[in-house]
Amino acid sequence: MALKRIAVLTSGGDAPGMNAAVRAAARTALFKGIEVFGVYRGYNGLINNDLFPMNLRSVSDIIHRGGTMLFTARCSEFNTEEGIQKAIKVCNDNGINGVVVIGGDGSLRGAQDLSRHGMPCIGIPGTIDNDISCCEYTIGYDTAMNTCMGMVDRLRDTAQSHDRCSVVEVMGRNAGYLALNVGIAVGATSIIVPEVPFDFERDIITRMKMTSQTGKKHFIVVVAEGVGGVMELADEIQKSTGIESRATILGHVQRGGSPSVRDRVLASEMGYHAVELLIEGKSNRVVATQNDSILDYDIEVALRMKKPFDFELYNMAHEISI
Ligand code: ADP
């Protein structure tokens, strides 16, 4: 059946650049004569029939904004067979025969469920955590790295002025990609990530003492969310070294802000590609990027893939921050 009307939704944690993906998907479809419905608050909107027809101007003035104009949410009802059936019925009742879902791995599982129930669905990875294995860069990751870098640069100013140690927690859920890259970019003395078991003495205290001997007086320790415990860590560091140590959890500031060039371009390409796939009659695919090209994978295959952690980069980071 030819594609007549699609629905676009954002789901799970928000990420800067989601708006650019919504805009690209909507405009691509409209350009090709396909009608578009925007769905509010992720899968909740599908279940509760909370959607609206979009025109070319519905997505005006959003490309530069963080967050998502469609709002986002988690929806436990969608994890049940009854919830999925409701969503499918709402799609059918509204004449929708294709769905674009922008979100993280949970949202992609939802997209898989829609596809399995006969509703053609394409996922777009939108998450600052960059934890979608098939995709080198997810929407929002680049912006979040830059936001974190800016915040830690500010912490460095004050850590430097007071000869302090600043222990900073950055997001990433169970993945250390954000922490590793931010850690390198801010010149952290230690970077602690879930992928590498860490030893307090070896990875923090010895490094601080070693660099103190060559005149270093302030320190930055970047800790991934998946490791956590920065308050306790700062206390322990102060007790062990006598250097005043402060903990900062960057938190949700990392999710906000105007998306970077990279995220806007990536999101635009992904939104475009997702609609092209629906037009080709594809379903259960996730759009991805590898080596600067846009491609797509079967969602099930994609969710089984493992993204290797860059140990070479991790080792390099520690060699140069002495
Ligand atoms: P993210 O997409 O950012 O990873 P979540 O994991 O919270 O965020 O998932 C967002 C939403 O996707 C959930 O609230 C739920 O509606 C849907 N979802 C998550 N996991 C599944 C699953 N296994 N099957 C179907 N839908 C799911």
Image (tube, helix red, strand yellow):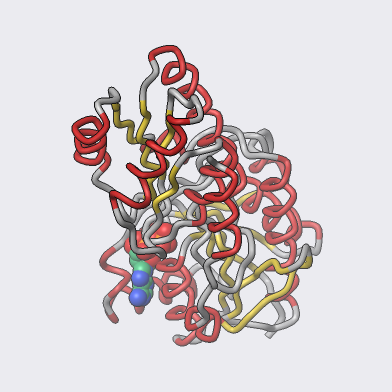
Quadrant of picture, ligand 1? bottom left
Q: Residue visible at 36% across and 22% down?
A: 164
274 with respect to 114 (left or right): right
Q: Residue furthest top?
A: 161
Q: Determine which quarter of the picture holds residue 166.
A: top left
Q: Residue visible at 41% across and 52% down?
A: 13
101 with respect to 263 (left or right): left
Along the viewing direction, whichever of 2 and 93 lies nearer the viewer: 2
Quadrant location of the N terminus? Answer: bottom right
Q: Determine which quarter of the picture holds residue 190.
A: top left
Residue 255: where, in percent of width, then height?
47, 41
Please determine whether, in this image, residue 108 is positioned above or below residue 191.
below
Along the viewing direction, whichever of 249 and 274 lies nearer the viewer: 249
137 with respect to 24 (left or right): left
Residue 174: where, in percent of width, then height?
37, 61
Q: Is residue 48 visible?
A: no
Q: Determine which quarter of the picture holds residue 117.
A: bottom left
Q: Residue visible at 74% across and 49% down?
A: 265
Residue 254: where, in percent of width, then height?
46, 38
Please determine whether, in this image, residue 262 is positioned above or below residue 108.
above
Residue 53: where, in percent of width, then height?
58, 53
Q: Residue visible at 24% across and 26% down?
A: 242
